[in-house]
Amino acid sequence: MNLQAVRSIYVFEMARAGRTLLQSLISPVISTSLYFVVFGAAIGSRIQEVEGVSYGAFIVPGLIMLMLLTQSVSNASFGIFFPKFTGTIYELLSAPISYFEIVLGYVGAAASKSAILGLVILGTANFFVDLHIQHPFMMMLFLLLTALTFSLLGFIIGIWADSFEKLQLVPLLIITPLTFLGGSFYSIDMLPSFWQGVTLANPVVYLVSGFRWSFYGISDVSVVASLVMIGVFLAVSLGVISWIFRTGYRLRP
Amino acid sequence: MSHETPLAPERAASSDATVDTPVDAQSENPGAQPAPVIAITGLSKRYDSGFEALKQIDLEIQRGEIFALLGPNGAGKTTLISIICGLVNASSGSVVVDGHDSVTDYRAARAKIGLVPQELTSDAFETVWNTVRFSRGLFGKAPNDAHLERVLKSLSLWDKRNNKLITLSGGMKRRVLIAKALGHEPEILFLDEPTAGVDVELRRDMWEVVRELRNSGVTIILTTHYIEEAEEMADRIGVINGGEIVLVREKAALMRQLGSKQLTLHLLTPLASVPPALAHHPLTLAEEGSVLVYTYDASEAGDSEHVSISALINEIEAAGIRFKDLHTKQSSLEDIFVNLVRERP
């Protein structure tokens, strides 16, 4: 195991976030705060409690999840896309490191960044609403697993994309709509029964639901189902990545 | 550039004797030849597009030599280097780097190799220092700032260590790429078109750095289409064309064997034609009869070359032709190269 290399990639990637602090930390915090002001305070004050939780507090897990998914994907995809774009990937491919170590470095850094961001947003939310977390351990588990899984997805997108447009395509056209429709801002009980059924096909529902359960003990689907879904995501992402590395897809012609 | 400090001091101290063995001696006595530092066997590459970039390449690189790989654009130079360094998967064949298979034992193989790519790529927003440190870490080497300082100083980059790469000129970026490769103390250094687009002064500086590296025991493989570069630097030359190695020879032997020579005599009085007494020699007149040119193949002439030339001069004098000056010219590597590539399209 070339731990030195993993460490180098990890530090390099974390330093990149440090250089772009405005983009990587402050901007998501500001946009989340805006959600709280608009949905939590302005509109939320006119919305009744959801299963005993004020609307402002209800959306906190969904908002964190929204940021976690989008930031994990964009961080990890950019991290591997940029060396491909500039050509510096030659060094990564010629170095004595395994694919596993490459993934560990890049995905580890991306997941760390979005997990830290998630916790920062949680801290920010605390300013706006009265928060209490019923299952802090499970909350951390959901946070870390989601950050990891979606960083893996981002890594795949970064390898697949051969243009900046494609890099933005999946986050904008798939991740964001699925997250908005995944119960971030509402309980799926609020939907007509037909749409409740459709919504269950949206994988993000399971993530948001499980995460919300760790806060308030309320959920749209069972916690076990949520954990299983994350496990399935993780397995699929790992499967695709191992296929990419086995075939050299878009990396080693 | 300053050259106060060796670039690879650790290895210089422990470099084995083969480093100093003249390459000529090695190849003239195959029985005593040490194991090659890189052994390429039956290497082929066909891209998904169907393009066959390499066809059954067999090549051995000797430890401590400077090997120049010459070839026209699209000949397969970069593909060959890319396979050895792990950037491209081979379709068939094997590469063994100092006893380590480049696929099954890639860690050990790649750890020995430093690559300076042809394209000037850089992490635009990183500083010189950070990018060189990153390279060293990537190759699994523990931080050694003293070594990196030596490398940067030898490449005249020390003053620029805190500059962002995006602010550097093309020549400086090229030096950074070399520094990144040297940062992890490779035993084998690949330079893919190292002086493409580099001005004359920097090119000479780089040659100096390359020589210094070789002296410290590093094996150097460079691709180039500047013939002058191969002629100036290389111990051995390989010519690749259409995905095949068409020739591998020591530079001196290559030039000795393949080069034709010209003896030029500047005559005191111009001639209208070559006198019949000299007609059996390949003589031509030039510059309106004031220059007599004798073209001969140095490889065929061998030791008898001097005899035949002195005989020729005697005959010329006997024919009453007086000359005020004479000089000989050996064909350059460029002539040899052009002939080779033209012969085997």
Image: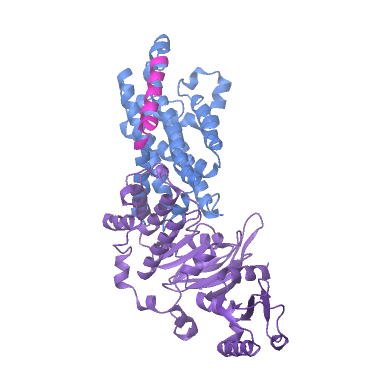
Chain colours: A blue, B purple
Find the residue positioned furthest to the front. B269
> Can residue B112 be seen here?
no
Residue A95 screen position, x and y as percent: 42, 57
Q: Quadrant of residue A150?
A: top left
- Confirm whether residue A84 shows in the render: yes
Quarter holding the C terminus of chain B is bottom right
Percent from the top left, x then y, of residue A224?
Answer: 43, 35
Expressed as whole percent of the image width and height from the top left, the position of residue A164 reads 53, 37
Task: Tell me what residue is drawn at x 48 percent, y 64 percent.
Answer: B222
- Would you say residue A9 sits in the magenta stretch? no
Q: Quadrant of the N terminus of chain B?
A: bottom left
* Along the viewing direction, whichever of B169 and B44 lies nearer the viewer: B169
Q: Residue at x 54, y 26 (%)?
A: A199
In the figure, is residue B158 to the left or right of B67? Answer: left
Q: Which residues are magenta?
A: A18-38
Which is nearer the eye, A170 or A66? A170
Which residue shows up at 56% across the image and 22% down it?
A: A195
Asked whether A208 or A10 is in front, the reply is: A10
Residue B271: % across, % down: 68, 78
Q: Residue furthest top?
A: A46
- Which of the 4 image quadrants contains residue B75? bottom right
Query: From the viewer's perspective, is residue B292 above or below residue B334?
Result: below
Q: Foreground: A158 or B143?
A: B143
